[in-house]
C-alpha cells in the first residue's frame, strides 16, 4: 500500500492540471453518512423509503414530511472538513488542482477553502423561494419550525437535485470540460454506479487515472492506479 501511495504522490508532483472527482466517501470521514453502504441512509428504516422521500414528486406532494427527513438527515452545518478536503484545497492553492467535481451537497470542499467546485447534485447551502426566487441560507431552512416559507408566502426549496430532476446543464458542461482537459484525474469515494455523474469519467483523455475507494468499482480495469484504502489514510500522506 505504501508503494501505491508513493506512486500517487509522484503522479501529483508530475501533473499540473489535476481534477478531483468525488462522491459520498469523501465526506464520511467527517461523520456524514453515505447512501448505499450497510450503514447508509438507504439501508435505514423510515416511514417512507429515502429514495422516495428525496424525489421531486414526494417534495411537491408531501412537503412537510420531506423537510422532516431533510432537516434530520441532510444538515451538514455541524460537520467540519476532513484531511481530504483540506489537502485538495492546498493543491488548488498551489495551482496544481484546477477543479473539484463533487456529487456531495454538504459544502465541505468550500469550507476547507476550495474555490473551483462543481456541485453536480447542488448544495444545502443554497435555497430559493419557488415563487419569487429569493435566496435563503441553510441556517434559515434548517432552523425553520416546519416547511420553510418565504416572506412572499412561497415555499423555499433547497438547491439540491432530487430524483426525477435534471442536473444543472452549466455545472455539467464545466465538469465535462475540466475532466476532458485534465492530465491527472483522481476519482475517489464513489462507487461509480450512479448515472449520469459516473459517466463523466468517460470524458477523460489525459495521462493518468487514479481510483481511490474502499471497494472495487466498474472502472478499476481502466485506471493507471487503484488504491483500495480510506481517503484519510491516503491524503494524510500527501
Image: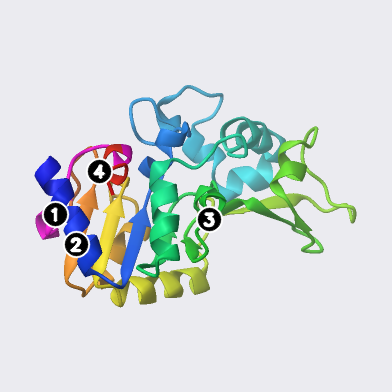
Foreground label between 4 and 1: 1
Identify the residue at image location x=67%, y=33%: 65
Which residues make up the magenta segment? Answer: 220-232
Badge number at residue 7: 1
Residue 230 highlighted magenta (yes or no):
yes
Left or right: where 207 falls relative to 188: left
10 Å neighbourhood of mark 2: few (<14), some, or many (≥20)? Answer: some
- Judging by the rendered image, the residue that carries numbered circle 2 is 11
Identify the residue at image location x=82%, y=47%: 149
* Rendering quarter of residue 9: bottom left
Distance from label 4 to label 1 (Cα)?
16 Å
Distance from label 2 to label 4 (Cα)?
17 Å
* Rendering quarter of residue 21: bottom left
Question: Relative to 64, does residue 13 appear above or below in the rendering?
Answer: below
Residue 76 versus residue 153: which sits nearer the camera?
Answer: 76
Left or right: where 44 falls relative to 230: right
Identify the residue at image location x=45%, y=32%: 33
- Judging by the rendered image, the residue that carries numbered circle 4 is 213
Residue 117 versus residue 17: which sits nearer the camera?
Answer: 17
Q: Secondary structure at mark 1?
A: helix
Badge number at residue 113: 3
Which numbered disc flags the more N-terminal residue, 4 or 3? 3
Distance from label 4 to label 3 (Cα)?
23 Å
Amino acid at each position: 500500500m505504501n508503494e501505491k501511495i508513493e506512486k500517487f504522490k509522484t503522479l501529483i508532483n508530475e501533473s499540473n492540471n489535476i481534477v478531483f472527482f468525488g462522491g459520498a466517501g469523501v465526506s464520511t470521514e467527517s461523520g456524514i453518512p453515505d447512501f448505499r453502504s450497510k450503514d447508509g441512509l438507504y439501508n435505514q428504516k423510515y416511514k417512507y423509503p429515502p429514495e422516495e422521500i428525496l424525489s421531486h414528486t414526494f417534495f411537491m406532494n408531501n412537503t412537510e414530511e420531506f423537510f422532516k427527513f431533510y432537516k434530520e438527515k441532510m444538515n451538514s452545518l455541524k460537520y467540519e472538513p476532513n484531511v481530504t478536503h483540506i489537502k485538495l484545497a492546498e493543491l488548488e492553492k498551489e495551482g496544481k488542482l484546477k477543479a473539484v467535481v463533487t456529487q456531495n451537497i454538504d459544502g465541505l470542499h468550500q469550507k476547507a477553502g476550495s474555490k473551483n467546485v462543481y456541485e453536480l447534485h447542488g448544495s444545502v447551502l443554497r435555497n430559493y423561494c419557488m415563487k419569487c426566487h429569493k435566496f435563503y441560507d441553510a441556517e434559515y431552512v434548517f432552523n425553520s419550525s416546519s416547511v420553510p416559507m418565504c416572506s412572499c408566502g412561497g415555499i423555499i426549496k433547497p438547491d439540491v437535485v432530487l430524483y426525477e430532476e435534471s442536473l444543472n446543464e452549466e455545472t455539467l458542461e464545466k465538469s465535462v470540460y475540466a475532466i476532458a482537459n485534465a492530465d491527472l484525474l483522481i476519482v475517489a469515494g464513489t462507487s461509480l454506479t450512479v448515472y449520469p455523474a459516473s459517466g463523466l469519467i468517460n470524458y477523460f483523455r489525459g495521462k493518468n487515472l487514479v481510483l481511490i475507494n474502499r471497494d472495487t468499482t466498474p472502472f478499476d480495469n481502466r485506471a493507471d492506479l487503484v488504491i483500495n484504502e480510506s481517503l484519510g489514510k491516503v491524503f494524510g500522506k500527501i
